[in-house]
Image (tube, rainbow, N blue to C red):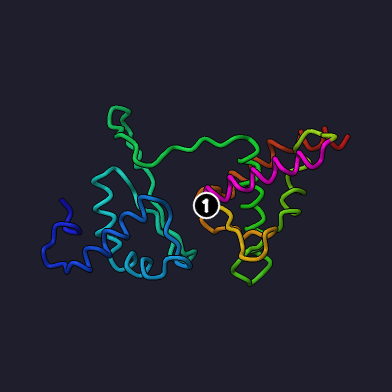
Amino acid sequence: MSDILASHAFSEQAQLDQSTLLIRLLKGPVYRSRHRDLWEQLLRDQQVIRDYFQHLGLGLTLDNSEGYAFLAQLQFESEDSELPRLITRRSLTFIQTLLLVALRKRLAEHDDEESAPRLIVSRQEIYQWLQPYSPEVSNELKQQREYDALIKKVAEMGFLSSIANLPDDFEVQRIIKAFVNAEQIAEFTVLLTPAQEQKDD
């Protein structure tokens, strides 16, 4: 077993801290802004933690400049080598993918144009992104409720965070950069262009 848990040199508190960090990573991403103590520990013990999770078939992705870290299932070339999954594979719907690409694209524009580290988007702004790709409806309130459900789902995925006392504003989490890259933005934009042109005609 990894030294991280087996070492008798650890004090009880040190072992508790290590276990807290390992469990936190298994439950989801660790963010510098939210988990300051865990983040420092993660940076300090990074290699040991990588080695520990590798035994479980998991890889640690850590971006210190953007302030996030998460675990992902290691991929093996041989299909026979696949291990039981500890990280659930997530399938996205078209509309979920559309919103993620729109958020990632907006974050790229924000980083090019502004010095502020945080990107805040409004509920209305998200509605405007989605409407060109949604069917025309007579019940606008029903459509907005569907958009709200989508926003909630994307927040549960960890790509949006609500802001205290501002229920219609959301912070775009930079971890989205690890899941949607510039090439995927370009591919999805090309895919959507004919549909947008057809709707505009």
Looking at the image, the residue that sits furthest to the left is 8
Residue 11 against residue 102 in the figure, above or below:
below
Q: Nearer the viewer, residue 195 or 12?
A: 12
**Where 130 sits versus 44, above or below?**
above
Residue 137, image x, y percentages: 82, 34
Residue 198 versus residue 70: which sits nearer the camera? 70
Estimate the x, y position of residue 71 in percent, counting from the top left.
38, 50
Looking at this view, name the residue that lies furthest to the right: 201
Q: Name the residue type under label 1.
A: Gly
The image shows residue 51 at horizontal and vertical percentages of: 24, 53
Q: Which residue matches tag 1?
A: 158
Please name the residue shown 76% across and 36% down the image.
134
User: In the rendered structure, which segment of residues is drawn in magenta?
Assistant: 139-158
Q: Is residue 141 rendered magenta in the image?
A: yes
Identify the residue at image location x=40%, y=58%.
Answer: 62
Residue 121 in view here: no
Within the image, what quadrant is residue 96 found in?
top right
- Main SS type for the magenta part? helix
Give the residue drawn at x 86%, y 37%: 200
In the rendering, at what x and y percent does residue 7 appear? 13, 61
Is residue 52 found left or right of 106 in the rendered image?
left
Classify mark 1: helix, strand or loop. Answer: loop
Quadrant containing the C terminus in the rendered view: top right
Q: Nearer the viewer, residue 55 or 125?
A: 125
Q: In which quarter of the image is residue 61?
A: bottom left
- Categorize mark 1 by other alpha carbons within 10 Å: few (<14), some (14-19), many (20+): some
Q: Which residue is drawn at 28% across and 50% down?
A: 53
